[in-house]
């Protein structure tokens, strides 16, 4: 059990970090669908910077900056130019995916043996790490894990326990009413999308910096799309997303373990199991999950239909 949790927790970090970035923009009404591409770009940038600079922290920070840039482009096109959020998001997804592979080949080149970096160092919390079963998986982790825990708690406190968080959530529920109360709708959508997209890129950078030490095309393997499903499953709430991410991470690891064990069935069938499980859960989750009322809708203060 402890071994299984040790595999699940890092994958939980990926899903939670990317999903928290997704709900951050979603709660202001911006439906970001660039996750798969931004995570791939974050993985490429994070690896290249860490390889060239010799600093994993530098790789994470630059990955955040690049992801934030994608978020800035998304919010300018949707908030300022009022273009369709889904169409712009798909275009940025393809652009980011292509840029990820191009960057790696331009900087690293094509080699027979891909270069490798040292993965993130794990830090142990004395005494707590000695607890049976959960000690090592939860209290012997790298600093990204502890950051994600603090981020999730902080987002919950901000959104559910503060007046500023109430104003923030009102932008996605009723932007017209929020605007009438003096809340800058465009500013809230801009900063939330920039920061949220940056967090998604860091989730992508976590793959080469924690799991593999190398970068390969396709290493995100569709998880960016699962992140969007996770946001809906969690009802766009930080703590619910934390719980949902544990399920997604567990299914992901089970799929990987099944391939290693070998069950005498085609590996393509095993690879699709996490996605099938996701679909089944979403069928029931959509009955009670609630999304922001104006998710995916651009705001025009001059329009009578804006609120």
Image (cartoon, rainbow, N blue to C red):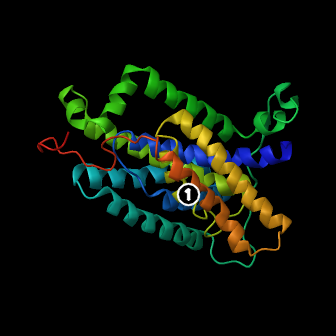
Res 153 quadrant in image: top right
Q: Which sits in the foreground, 155 or 110?
A: 155
Residue 155 visible somewhere in the drawing: yes
Res 44 quadrant in image: bottom right
Residue occupying the point 45% across, 42% down:
23
Q: Which sits in the foreground, 234 or 84?
A: 234
The quadrant of the rendering that contains the N terminus is top right
Res 258 quadrant in image: bottom right
Q: Which sits in the foreground, 24 or 212?
A: 24
Residue 249 lies left or right of residue 68; in this view the side is: right
* Residue 188 placement (x, y as % from top left): 32, 37
* Residue 107 placement (x, y as % from top left): 58, 69
Residue occupying the point 42% across, 20% down:
162
Residue 117 visible somewhere in the drawing: no
In the picture shown, does residue 101 fall above or below 213?
Answer: below
Classify mark 1: helix, strand or loop. Answer: helix
The quadrant of the rendering that contains the C terminus is top left
Q: Residues within 10 Å of mark 1 (few under 14, many from 20)?
A: some
Q: Which sits in the foreground, 152 or 250?
A: 250
In the picture shown, does residue 2 fall above or below 93?
Answer: above
* Residue 133 placement (x, y as % from top left): 85, 36
**Residue wearing tag 1:** 279
């Amino acid at each position: 059990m402890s071994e299984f949790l040790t595999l699940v927790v890092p994958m939980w970090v990926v899903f939670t970090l990317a999903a928290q970035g997704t709900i951050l923009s979603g709660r202001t009404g911006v439906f970001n669908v660039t996750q798969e591409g931004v995570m791939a770009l974050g993985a490429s940038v994070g690896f290249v910077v860490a390889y060239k600079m010799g600093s994993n922290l530098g790789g994470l920070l630059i990955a955040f900056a690049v992801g934030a840039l994608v978020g800035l482009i998304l919010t300018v096109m949707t908030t300022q130019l009022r273009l369709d959020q889904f169409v712009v998001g798909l275009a940025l997804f393809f652009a980011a995916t292509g840029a990820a592979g191009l960057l790696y080949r331009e900087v690293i080149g094509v080699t027979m043996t891909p270069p490798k970096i040292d993965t993130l160092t794990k830090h142990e919390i004395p005494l707590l790490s000695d607890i049976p079963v959960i000690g090592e998986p939860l209290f012997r982790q790298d600093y990204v894990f502890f950051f994600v825990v603090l981020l999730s708690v902080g987002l919950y406190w901000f959104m559910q326990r503060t007046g500023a968080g109430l104003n923030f959530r009102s932008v996605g529920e009723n932007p017209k009413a929020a605007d009438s109360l003096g809340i800058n709708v465009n500013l809230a959508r801009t900063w939330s999308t920039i920061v949220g997209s940056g967090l998604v890129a860091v989730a992508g950078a976590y793959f080469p910096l924690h799991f593999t030490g190398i970068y390969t095309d396709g290493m995100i393997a569709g998880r960016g799309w699962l992140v969007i499903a996770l946001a809906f499953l969690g009802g766009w709430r930080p703590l619910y997303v934390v719980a949902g991410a544990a399920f997604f991470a567990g299914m992901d690891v089970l799929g990987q373990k099944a391939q290693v064990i070998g069950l005498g069935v085609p590996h393509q069938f095993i690879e699709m199991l996490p996605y099938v499980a996701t679909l089944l859960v979403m069928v029931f989750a959509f009955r009670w999950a609630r999304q922001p009322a104006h998710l995916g809708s651009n705001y025009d203060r001059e329009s009578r239909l804006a609120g």
